[in-house]
Image: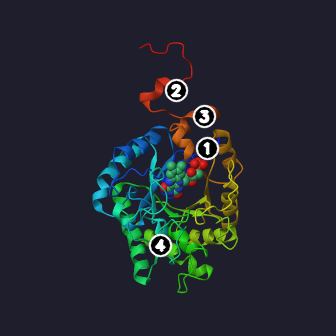
């Protein structure tokens, strides 16, 4: 039995396989609005057979965008195009998910291919916030530490965004608690130097994430799954580490979170990360075993055999692929062929399914 193509039920949502499109910023939106690029980008991967497609980091407020070109879901006007994309994904038998995000001190920065560091207000940038007034790096914006009211606004923005997700037809929400963005900034003692109830002890540093989870769960229906992506380590002495991640995952399990998407890093520039095939899988494995919660493995998973082995060895429940899906939007159809599993192809493409060429082109 091939695990990669075993369906997975999360609450009332069943994924047809365990292959997930990892969220990937496209830096192609204007004022947060999705457009044809997003439809084709996400739609192709639905045609390609992914079980779950998690839309890129989508900002819960304009100031929470990483770059001026990020997707957003802070106003109802964003919904019609998102709904259209989700209807297309659903019609292909894939499940539409979204990553809700706030970039915190890493907001107002250039899209990858446009530049590096702070976008000035003269070029569409904005003042940024964080747990403390410590910038990510010298060329990054100087954040203003959130006050109590500012923290309540962040929580309310996530709640309102989750409500809009429902209206837009998403069936899975992933909260972005990784990669050095706002929720991770609160988790890590390297970025969180607060002295109030949101800083200091582990209990205080995880408070904002738990409150965002609670606010999301208030409006996100019982039958729909909630995922949290975390960075399981800062890869830096004195920072957030794997023991903290296990403890947090166990807490999240009791708060209505169904799966932990286990990434790492992003909160410390130039942290020494031992990048290699499947390098983050051990974190997914440890969190699954020690916190007793389902996990997703991500990071340099690039071929069907590797992906299958992660699941077969019980290291994770889902595999998320990012860059391989940019190379090969039909990765699941290819993986099924490689692993000898019969899966339906879109009828429009069925003539290409048998890999024989005897009568190609005849009709
Ligand atoms: C183009 C691109 C955009 C990304 N954007 C996001 C994002 O929006 N949210 C996120 O959590 N990770 C993002 N990532 C990280 C991926 O989701 C993934 O964790 C990482 O690329 C490792 O997986 P891979 O080796 O399969 O690419 C992005 C990666 C790429 C390549």
Q: Is residue 313 left or right of residue 40?
A: right
Is residue 234 visible to the viewer in this orientation of the structure?
A: yes
Q: Are marks 1 and 2 in contact (CB under 8 Å)?
A: no
Q: Mark 4 or mark 3, which is nearer the start of the sequence?
A: 4
122 w.r.t. 302: above or below: below
Q: Residue at x 47, y 23 (%)?
A: 351
Residue 326 x/y as whole percent = 51, 42
**In screen coordinates, is 203 left or right of 361?**
right
| First reached walking from the N terminus: tag 3 or tag 1 | 1
Circles 3 and 4: CB distance less than 8 Å?
no
Residue 174 vs 145, above or below: the answer is above
Q: Which residue is mark 4?
A: 142
Disc 3 to disc 1: CB gap under 8 Å: yes
Residue at which label 3 appears = 341
Question: Mark 2 highlights which residue?
Answer: 353
The mark closer to the camera, 3 or 2, is 2
Q: Is mark 2 within 8 Å of ligand 1?
A: no
Labels 4, 2: front one: 4
C-alpha separation, residue under disc 3 versus residue under disc 1? 9 Å
């Amino acid at each position: 039995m091939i695990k990669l193509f075993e369906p997975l039920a999360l609450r009332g949502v069943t994924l047809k396989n365990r292959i997930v499109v990892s969220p990937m910023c496209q830096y192609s939106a204007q004022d947060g609005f999705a457009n044809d690029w997003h439809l084709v980008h996400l739609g192709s991967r639905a045609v390609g057979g992914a079980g779950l497609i998690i839309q890129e980091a989508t900002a819960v407020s304009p100031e929470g965008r990483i770059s001026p070109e990020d997707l957003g879901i802070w106003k109802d006007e964003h919904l019609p195009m998102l709904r259209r994309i989700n209807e297309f994904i659903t019609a292909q038998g894939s499940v539409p998910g979204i990553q809700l995000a706030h970039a915190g001190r890493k907001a107002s920065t250039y899209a990858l291919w446009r530049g590096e560091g702070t976008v000035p207000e003269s070029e569409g940038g904005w003042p940024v916030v964080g747990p403390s007034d410590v910038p990510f790096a010298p060329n990054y914006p100087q954040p203003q530490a959130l006050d109590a009211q500012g923290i309540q606004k962040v929580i309310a923005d996530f709640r309102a965004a989750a409500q809009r997700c429902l209206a837009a037809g998403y069936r899975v929400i992933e909260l972005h608690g990784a990669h050095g963005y706002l929720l991770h900034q609160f988790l890590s003692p390297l970025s969180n130097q607060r002295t109030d109830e949101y800083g200091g002890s582990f209990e205080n540093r995880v408070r904002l994430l738990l409150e965002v989870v609670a606010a999301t769960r208030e409006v996100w229906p019982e039958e729909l799954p909630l995922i949290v992506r975390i960075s399981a380590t800062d890869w830096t002495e004195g920072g957030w580490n794997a023991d903290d991640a296990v403890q947090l995952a166990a807490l999240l399990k009791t708060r209505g979170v169904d799966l932990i998407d286990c990434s790492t890093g992003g909160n410390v520039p130039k942290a020494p990360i031992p990048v290699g095939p499947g390098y983050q899988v051990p974190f997914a494995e440890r969190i699954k075993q020690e916190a007793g919660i389902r996990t997703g493995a991500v990071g340099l998973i690039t071929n069907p055999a590797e992906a299958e082995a992660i699941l077969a060895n019980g290291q994770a429940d889902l595999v998320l692929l990012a860059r391989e899906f940019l190379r090969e939007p039909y990765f699941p159809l290819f993986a099924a062929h490689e692993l000898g599993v019969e899966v339906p192809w879109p009828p429009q493409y069925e003539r290409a399914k048998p890999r024989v060429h005897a009568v190609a082109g005849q009709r």
